[in-house]
């Protein structure tokens, strides 16, 4: 069966510090991968998605970036965090084919920027 | 552009009563619709999806959803609510207009009172 891992579960970082959140998927190959941010326990904002190694599509211009160095690894990064980067970050995966497919979400990382 | 709307921020029902969480959609082309549930401090979990076929879709945990093309709705239902159904529910639509994106509604918080 497939599983998705995210770490860390919680993170408190000062403004201006770097960020690295990691997501890995097990039990499937060539998944589509997604990073979302959820603010105030409500709607989801799609940040990045990837359909393959090294292929990243950005949905929102901001100080965050994403990378996919391996097929089942997705990393969210920032060089300098802003207060507005606080939120609940969710990684998700879906089968690439056949479309359309449901997404499977990780447990999330709660980021607080102080 | 594809979109979904969840007109109710919150729905309150008594345990044992039927529940409905509303969703309307706007798409160009065939609608591919999903429902997800989120428990506190957790990732989203897939409940069910409509791709084609029967208008009544059955999903996990006794939930079902009714697709109504003329009313462009995809309401989530359950015949008898449980206290444990209390959570945040998201309706979503697959967006094929550009890339591999799913558009999520703002979410509806369901409270089931014992």
Image (tube, coloured by chain):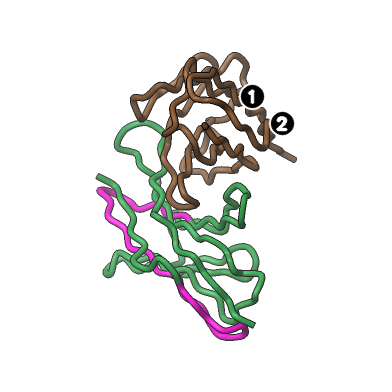
Q: How far across and how far down the image is residue B103, in percent?
A: 38, 46
Check disc 1 and report its element: helix, strand or loop.
loop
Residue located at (39% from left, 25% from top): A58
Chain under callout 2: A
Instruction: Decide if residue B87 is on the left or right side of residue B33.
Output: right
Q: Which residue is mark 1?
A: A72
Q: Which mark is residue A26?
A: 2
Q: What is the drawing colour of chain A?
A: brown
Residue located at (54% from left, 25% from top): A14
**Mark found first going from the N terminus, 2 or 1:** 2
Residue contact at pointers 2 and 1, CB within 8 angstroms: yes
Taking depth in this image into account, of A27 and B38 the one nearest to the observer is: B38
Chain under callout 1: A
Check disc 2 and report its element: helix, strand or loop.
strand
Chain identifier, green in the render: B
Taking depth in this image into account, of B97 and B89 the one nearest to the observer is: B89
- The boundaries of the magenta stretch are B11-34
- Choose top left, top right, bottom left or bottom right for residue A44: top left
Instruction: Decide if residue B80 is on the left or right side of residue A44.
Output: right
């Amino acid at each position: 069966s497939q599983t998705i891992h995210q770490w860390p579960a919680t993170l408190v970082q000062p403004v201006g510090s770097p960020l690295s959140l990691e997501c890995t998927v097990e039990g499937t190959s060539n998944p589509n991968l997604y990073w979302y941010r959820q603010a105030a326990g409500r709607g989801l904002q799609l940040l990045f998605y990837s359909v393959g190694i090294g292929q990243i599509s950005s949905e929102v211009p901001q100080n965050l970036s994403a990378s996919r160095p391996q097929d089942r690894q997705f990393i969210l990064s920032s060089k300098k965090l802003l207060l507005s980067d606080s939120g609940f970050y969710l990684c998700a995966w879906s089968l690439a084919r056949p479309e359309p497919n449901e997404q499977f979400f990780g447990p999330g990382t709660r980021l607080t920027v102080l | 552009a594809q979109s979904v709307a969840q007109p109710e921020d919150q729905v309150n029902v008594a345990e044992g009563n039927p529940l409905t969480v509303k969703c309307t959609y706007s798409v160009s082309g065939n609608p591919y619709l999903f429902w997800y549930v989120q428990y506190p401090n957790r990732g989203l979990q897939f409940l069910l999806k409509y791709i084609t076929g029967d208008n009544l879709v059955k999903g996990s945990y006794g939930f079902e959803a009714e697709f109504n093309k003329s009313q462009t709705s995809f309401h989530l239902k359950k015949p008898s609510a449980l206290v444990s159904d209390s959570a945040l529910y998201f309706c979503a639509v697959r967006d094929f207009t550009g890339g591999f994106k799913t558009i999520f509604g703002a979410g509806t918080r369901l409270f089931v009172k014992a």
